[in-house]
Amino acid sequence: MTLPNGPRTPKYFRFFRLLKLVFRPLAYLENYAQRYGDIVKIGGDNSPPFVYISNPQAIKEIFTADPNLFESGRGNGVLRFLLGDRSLILLDSEPHQQQRRLLTPPFHGDRLRTYSQLICDITEKVTHSWTIGAPFLLRPQMQDITMQVILQAVFGLYEGERLQQLQKCVSALMDSFGSPLSSTLVFFRFLQKDWGPLSPWGRLLRLKQRVRELIYAEIRDRRAEMQTSQNSPSNRTDILSLLMLARDEAGQSMTDEELHDQLMTLLIAGHESTASALVWALYWVHYLPEVQQTLRQELDDLGERPNPKDIVQLPYLTAVCQETLRIYPVVPSTFIRVLKTPMSLLNYQFEAGTALLPSTYLVHQRPDLYPDPKRFDPKRFLEKQYAPYEYFPFGGGGRRCIGSALAQLEMKLALAIILKHCHLELTHNHPVKPVRRGFTFAPPGNLRMVVTQKS
């Protein structure tokens, strides 16, 4: 069998390799790519290997292959403790396709556009609380926006004790692995020991259990509400209500467990990743004056109170968001695909059990696709349309993120509203690099801005 090159790391060095992945993730990926090329084998001496792929043609073959060739639930099992067994991310074959069919309609078309004004209103509310001249940490403010969007658009929660508890507990849960050091909890199993509520893993488990209880309580209350209104919540457009009304081909609705696990997935993935993307966007726009000037001019041309529909169609705003997700994608790789049967990929043969990992970050850094890839340049997206295997911040193929359209809508509108209402400055105008935040790449948590003017 022909296999690609890769590091031949003695077993006792693998721990240190994993440490580098946690604490220096960019160097980990770039060093292997520079040394071994765009298909890198990790392990494989005594078991099927783990393969990083940054070759666009190979990724195209993976994205367009029959999804039944892969087992993604097994490869992404590390997320099971957080999301639950029925999460879309962990399902394969027909169960995955069935859940995807039920989940897709609320995230597209007219249903999606109903959330536009909601996103604008939430962003205006958050920015209204900012004080001129008072520096603030950027990430918590963006988390506030994305959390409120998720709780209102997805859960239909606008006020009350449950909303406050969910917001508090989910934020604390994500902060449990919000730094490179605390992220070791999800990478090293020997740290996953419940030594009580004051231990790191014990605290994480209790927070997760509290979030679980709150979500199930909301599902129970919503079912009771729908029965009272004869299964027709006419005044509700939130995604939870739509999912509870959805039926598969056999006329079956989603179970409480399925609803919980999908809501947990949307809550964790949607809130966390979009907040990081917004922090990056604001950083780049204010780090590069020419980008800010061009973007503000485009926004000003829409007038004082632009329609959200007109905002999301702005070409340069769209390009800024695309470039933000290119240069430092929040999720550095797509979900793992484990081969069920042998597969030929380019000139290599991979056995069943091989874990294939298309690397979003490495593809987005290819100079043959993106000249001078370390430079933030939105214009590249105005000059070229990239193929879905050349640019894929939301994954690809049958595993593409189902909430990608909502995330892009939220990103565009929130960024535009912030710039329309506030003039900001970075407190320190120096280059920053991504840091590990759980399974994602994120801006440093200490990134601060200050409001210099409001309009």
Image (cartoon, rainbow, N blue to C red):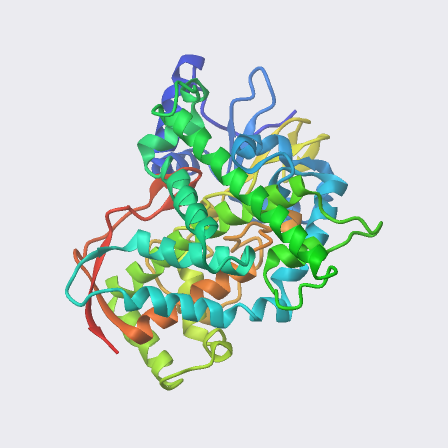
Q: Residue at x 74, y 47 (%)?
A: 98
Q: Residue at x 32, y 52 (%)?
A: 140
Q: Residue at x 51, y 57 (%)?
A: 157
Where residue 435 appears, as percent x and y from the top left, is: 32, 41
Could you say which quadrant of the image residue 148 lies in? bottom left
Where residue 309 appears, as percent x and y from the top left, is: 51, 77
Of 395 and 342, nearer the camera is 395
Horizontally, is 263 left or right of 195 in the view?
A: right
Horizontally, is 177 left or right of 128 in the view?
A: right
Total numbered labels: 0
* 240 over 62 or under it: above or below: below
Horizontally, is 48 left or right of 427 in the view?
A: right
Residue sitting at the far right:
250
* 60 over 341 or under it: above or below: below
Where residue 178 appears, as percent x and y from the top left, is: 35, 39
Where residue 203 appears, as percent x and y from the top left, is: 39, 29
Residue sitting at the far left:
133
What quarter of the picture does the N terminus occupy?
A: top right
> Is residue 348 in view from this perspective?
no
Of 211 and 314, nearer the camera is 211
Of 258 and 289, nearer the camera is 258
Could you say which quadrant of the image residue 388 lies in? bottom right
> Is residue 132 in view from this perspective?
yes
What quarter of the picture does the C terminus occupy?
A: bottom left
Q: Residue at x 38, y 71 (%)?
A: 416
Of 395 and 39, nearer the camera is 395
